[in-house]
Amino acid sequence: MKAFLAAGAWFTAAVVLVVGSVVALSWAGFLGQISILFYRGLVLTAVGEVLCFAVLLIARRRWPAWHVRDAVSACAFAGGVAICLLIVLPVTIDRSISVFMLTQMAAQPDHAFTPAELRTLFVDVYVERYGQIERRLDEQAVSRNVAQTANGFRITPQGLAFVRFARLLSVIFQTDRRFVTPAATRVDARRSAVP
């Protein structure tokens, strides 16, 4: 039991070090030039893991029962926890339509919103005022999933590969396939109307 508690403390310390580093570095504005939160979080997690590894190696001097492999495994575990937290919490908040909708409703908690009101609020504020389509296109250009042309944006081979991967994950995890299936466009509708 004592060994189990010691391992738990070792791994908990690693998680606190990595997650704490990510939060502290974020607050300090470190790597703020990386505009995509997810990418910045990945790099900050890697920095946190390096810091954690250094601290655990120093801690080994006091507790020689711990080996380098224990530091590596604790850092890997802590990095996994940090990535899960990054994806589930800040990235979801940063990108979620649901969070936007609930935030707007929280501003007027006594008002009963209709779907039409929320739809209008979403388009007027989220899409138009906050420029979220442009933001997403810029992010996808940085990610190299789309490329800007003289007339707009075009999906790249990497972007097509990502869509295929997203469709596979949608099948595996049974997500709403409408988000990985193209919506019928006017061109498609015209083609199907032609006998």
Image: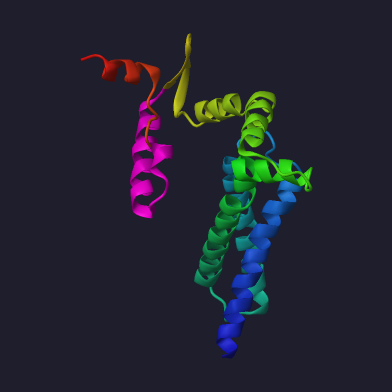
Extent of the magenta region = 155-180
For the N terminus, the image quarter is bottom right
Residue at 63% across, 61% down: 52
The question of residue 38 being in magenta is answered with no
Q: Is residue 37 visible?
A: no
Residue 182 or residue 155, whichever sits in front: 182
Q: Is residue 74 above or below residue 167?
A: below
Q: Is residue 57 above or below residue 99?
A: below
Residue at 55% across, 68% down: 74
Percent x, y of residue 94: 64, 42
Q: Is residue 193 visible?
A: yes
Q: Is residue 136 above or below residue 49?
A: above
* Left or right, 36 with reference to 158: right
Percent x, y of residue 134: 59, 24
Residue at 25% across, 14% down: 194
* Left or right, 73 with reference to 154: right
Residue 107 or residue 135, whichever sits in front: 107
Picture quadrant of residue 101: top right
For the C terminus, the image quarter is top left
Percent x, y of residue 159: 40, 31
Residue at 39% across, 22% down: 185
